[in-house]
């Protein structure tokens, strides 16, 4: 009877899997590419921000902190610049979401 | 000055050495003075694929450590007189390769060659990093399969950040996609990633598509680069790829299933 089973099996084709492969690859690579570029642009961003801010206020380039936090729904880019001077004006904080 | 080409993939077993051997031989057949270097120290195989395993006396590690001169380690191919092979060491470990040592060898070879083909080991560790470090151009060998495409994407990231060109902020390494083991019949049945899908995902220029072919195993059995078998689809596809690499306009072939006659449909035709 095995020939009968073979006959029926061959009539019910399996669904194609290639589209599945493409979809999964696109999702996993989208995530991996983010991780790859993350460290690359932050130092440059920090340098450029310091250059722009320094045009208006005297700042200590060593006391600038740029951090990027990528979440599922929302990502935050935080830029923290310590302004030298009297304590009252120090620790001003600029943040962009 | 020679053009330095790395053949790389991240993933193992996709056809890097087969492709290195075929492309180096093809470039040499076109009259270009070419040397192909095996970077897989500890697991050398290019010598077997090129059929020169019994002529290896010295290897790349001997040259780096000063035990042999470069000329003593280079094996001249007996089929194509513009081609030579620099084998990897089989007994040493991959730490024997150094950036300075490899740089010196590449500088010396650059003086009297048109192309230096670097056959990368799998992975993204020292051997693979050194194989791609000096590259001007990269051939990314990819199978139509999820893990291979993912690893190719990863190695593209490495090329863009860890190559000498990237470090020195010069023009980036020129990237070429070489899809190997492509089976148009399985693609047609929806069982295998389409060429268009791979191109869309990796988004680099396509150099060639090598169809799945029995001739590749036959070629490695006998130690002849598959490009020498111009009867076979794979050999012809490699020849086309070499032509495109040198700037020829050649249409892609072997992208559709071969039309089978009644005889082969009845008795099961096989890929040539």
Image (spheres, coloured by chain):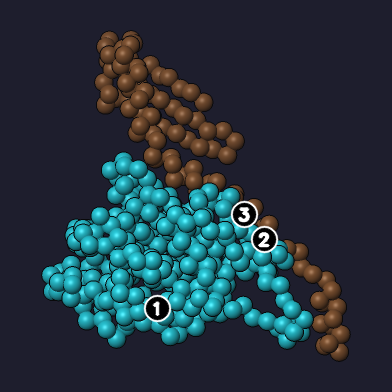
Q: What is the crowding at mark 2: few (fewer than 14 residues within 10 Å), some, or many (at least 20)? A: many
Label of residue B196 in the image: 3
Query: In the visual, does B94 lie left or right of B203?
Result: left
Residue found at x 33% / y 27%:
A47
**Co-location on one chain, circles 1 and 3:** yes
Question: Which one of the lettered chains is coloured brown?
Answer: A
Q: Earlier in the sequence, mark 1 or mark 3?
A: 1
Kindly identify the residue that appears in the image at 53 percent across and 49 percent down: B203
Which of B42/B84 is in front? B84
Per the image, label 2 sits on a secondary structure element best described as: helix
Mark linked to residue B49: 1
Q: Colour of chain B?
A: cyan
Residue B207 located left or right of residue B106: right
In this orientation, which residue lies closer to the viewer: A76 or B254?
B254
Determine which of the numbered discs, if any, sits on residue A18 in the image.
Answer: 2
Question: Residue B219 at x, y = what percent?
Answer: 46, 81
Among the 4 quarters of the image, the one containing residue B24: bottom left
Which label is found at residue B159? none
Q: Residues within 10 Å of mark 1 (few under 14, many from 20)?
A: many
Residue B263: percent from left, percent from top: 75, 84
Secondary element at tag 3: helix
């Amino acid at each position: 009877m095995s020939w009968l089973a073979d006959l029926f099996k061959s009539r019910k084709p399996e669904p194609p899997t290639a589209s599945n492969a493409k979809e999964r690859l696109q999702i996993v690579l989208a995530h991996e590419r983010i991780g790859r570029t993350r460290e690359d642009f932050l130092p440059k961003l920090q340098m450029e921000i310091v250059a722009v801010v320094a045009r208006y206020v005297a700042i200590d380039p060593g006391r600038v902190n740029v951090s990027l936090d990528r979440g599922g729904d929302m990502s935050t880019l935080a830029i923290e610049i310590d302004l030298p001077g009297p304590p009252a004006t120090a620790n001003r904080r600029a943040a962009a979401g | 000055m020679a053009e330095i080409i790395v053949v790389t993939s991240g993933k193992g077993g996709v056809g890097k050495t087969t492709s290195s051997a075929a492309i180096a031989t093809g470039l040499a057949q076109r009259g270009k003075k070419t040397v192909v270097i095996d970077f897989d120290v500890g697991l050398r195989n290019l010598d077997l694929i090129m059929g020169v395993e019994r002529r290896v006396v010295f290897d790349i590690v001997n040259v780096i450590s000063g035990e042999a001169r470069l000329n003593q380690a280079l094996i001249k191919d007996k089929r194509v007189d513009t081609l030579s092979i620099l084998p990897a060491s089989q007994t040493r470990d991959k730490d024997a390769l150094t950036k300075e040592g490899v740089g010196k060898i590449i500088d010396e070879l650059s003086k009297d060659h048109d192309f230096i083909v670097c056959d990368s080991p799998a992975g993204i560790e020292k051997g693979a990093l050194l194989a791609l470090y000096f590259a001007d151009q990269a051939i990314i060998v990819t199978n139509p399969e999820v893990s291979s495409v993912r690893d190719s994407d990863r190695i593209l990231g490495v090329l863009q950040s860890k190559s000498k060109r990237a470090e020195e902020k010069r023009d980036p390494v020129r990237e070429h996609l070489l899809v190997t083991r492509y089976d148009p019949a399985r693609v047609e049945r929806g069982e295998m990633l389409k060429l268009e899908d791979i191109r869309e995902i990796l988004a680099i220029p396509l150099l060639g598509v090598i169809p799945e072919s029995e001739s590749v195993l036959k070629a490695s059995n006998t130690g002849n680069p598959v490009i020498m078998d111009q009867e076979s689809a794979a050999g012809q596809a490699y020849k086309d790829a070499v032509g495109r690499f040198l700037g020829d306009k050649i249409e892609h072939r072997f992208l559709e299933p071969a039309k089978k006659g009644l005889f082969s449909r009845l008795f099961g035709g096989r890929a040539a």
